[in-house]
Image (spheres, coloured by chain):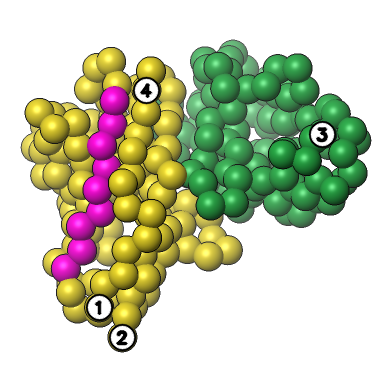
Chain colours: A green, B yellow
Amino acid sequence: EAGVAQSPRYKIIEKRQSVAFWCNPISGHATLYWYQQILGQGPKLLIQFQNNGVVDDSQLPKDRFSAERLKGVDSTLKIQPAKLEDSAVYLCASSLAGPNEQFFGPGTRLTVL
Amino acid sequence: AQSVTQPDIHITVSEGASLELRCNYSYGATPYLFWYVQSPGQGLQLLLKYFSGDTLVQGIKGFEAEFKRSQSSFNLRKPSVHWSDAAEYFCAVGLNDMRFGAGTRLTVKP
C-alpha cells in the first residue's frame, strides 16, 4: 500500500513570495490533515478535510494560507505572501475517517529567507 | 480550549531502564488519545491509541499507555528501553480535531 505522498520535499523562498505544497493521501482515506511543525515544537493542525469539505480550519491563518481538496483526493496548501515565521515542516496526513490512526507523509521543509 | 501538555521536554534514561512519558490534556469531553513517535528525519508513526474500553492499551515496540480520566492523563510507558527508542514522542488528542503536545525528546544512554 502506497503511503502519503508530498511534494516538494524542500523549498526555499524569499519573504513575500508565494509557495504551494501538494499532498496525495492514501487511497480511500476520506480525512486529510495539514499540519505545520516548527522546529522544536509539536505539529499544529492547520486544516482538516472530510472528503472535499472543511471540518476544522480554526488555526489556519486565513489572511495568507489557503487550502483546497478538489474531488476529495489530492490537496494543495498555499502560502501567499510568505513570512519568515512560516519556516517550518508542513506535514500532510490522512486517515480512513475522522479521528482514526493518521498516516503521515514525509513533509515539506520550507525555509523563508 | 483544547490543549495537550507534555511536561518533560527532554528525558534521558539508561538502556534497559523503564520509561514513563507524561501527557495531560484539557478537553470538553473525553477525546480520542494517541501517542506518536518521530525519529530524526522520519515521519510520525503511531505507537498506540485509546478510543474507549480498557484503560490500559498496548502498542507497537513494547509500549503501553494508561488512560486516567480523573487525572486527564495518558502516560506512555515501556518496561525496558532500547537504544533504538531514542526519538521524539508526541501525545495527541482529539475528536473531530487533533491537537498535539510539544513533544518529549528521549535520549538513551548505553
Q: CA distance from mark 3 to mark 4?
A: 28 Å
Q: If you read the primary sequence from the N terminus, does the residue marked by circle 4 or circle 1 appear first?
A: 4
Q: Which numbered tag is attached to residue A82?
A: 3
Q: CB atoms at circles 1 and 2 under 8 Å apart?
A: yes
Task: Give the residue at mark 1.
Answer: B14
Q: If you read the primary sequence from the N terminus, does the residue marked by circle 1 or circle 2 appear first?
A: 1
Task: Give the residue at mark 4.
Answer: B2
Residue type at mark 3 is: Ala
Q: Position of residue A20 (x, y in %)?
A: 80, 35
Name the magenta segment's main secondary structure. strand
Residue type at mark 1 is: Ser
Q: Establish whether labels 1 and 3 are both on one chain.
A: no
Q: Which residues are magenta?
A: B18-26
Q: Establish whether labels 4 and 1 are both on one chain.
A: yes
Q: Position of residue B37 (x, y in %)?
A: 40, 55
Is A27 or A92 nearer to us in this picture? A92
Report helix, strand or loop for mark 1: strand
Chain ID for label 3?
A: A
* Snapshot quadrant of residue A97: top left
Mark 4: few/some/many CA within 10 Å (<14, 14-19, 20+)? some
Q: CA distance from mark 1 to mark 3?
A: 43 Å
Residue type at mark 4 is: Gln
Q: CA distance from mark 2 to mark 4?
A: 38 Å
